Amino acid sequence: MRKAAADSAQLSFGAFDVDFDAALIAAAECLSRKITKSRYSREQMADLVTALLGRKLTAARLNDWLAPANRNRMPADVLVACCYILGDFEPLDILLAVVGRVTADKRDQAFADLGRIQLERESLKQQEDRARAILKREG
């Protein structure tokens, strides 16, 4: 039973019904469309990934990973490199969405930080108000 669960690409994590295979296929299809619409050929993309990662990636291997029927998964570093080169992280967002996450750039992170700081500030203000009210009542 344990082996069967480990072999399954579909797992349940609380509220998430995670189908990694479907997400991987959707991410590969998305990346394939993005490359096709970009200024880069598959050969150029493979060369750019090679330069970025420091190990050889051929266009044939990239095509293999992006083929809809292929069950071989693209390594995460290659996916990230492709997204970085294209300046588009939608394929990563597709993968992260199955577990309720998204990518965020530094600007998005700064806005999130400001939101957290504001919430903390409001909480501290409430604590301060309660403390002052006690001191006022107690004299």
Image: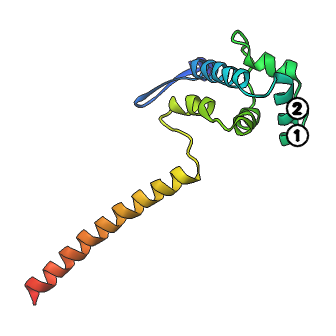
Residue 49 lies, in percent from the top left, at 83, 35
Looking at the picture, does residue 52 appear above or below residue 33? below
Identify residue type, mark 2: Asp
Looking at the image, which residue is at 34% across and 61% down? 119
Classify residue 87 by image quadrant: top right
Identify residue type, mark 1: Ala
Looking at the image, which residue is at 20% across and 75% down? 129
Classify residue 94 by image quadrant: top right
Residue 54 lies, in percent from the top left, at 89, 41
Q: Is residue 5 visible?
A: no
Q: Going by the image, does 45 lie left or right of 118?
A: right
Circle 2 sits on which residue?
Answer: 47
- How is the model colour-coded? rainbow
Q: Going by the image, does 48 lie left or right of 89?
A: right
Classify residue 29 by image quadrant: top right
Looking at the image, which residue is at 74% across and 33% down? 82
Looking at the image, which residue is at 23% across and 69% down? 126
Q: Are marks 1 and 2 in contact (CB under 8 Å)?
A: yes
Q: How many neighbours does mark 1 have within 10 angstroms: few (below 14), some (14-19), or many (20 or more)? A: few
Secondary-structure class at tag 2: helix
Q: Going by the image, does 53 lie left or right of 21?
A: right
Looking at the picture, does residue 134 appear above or below residue 40? below
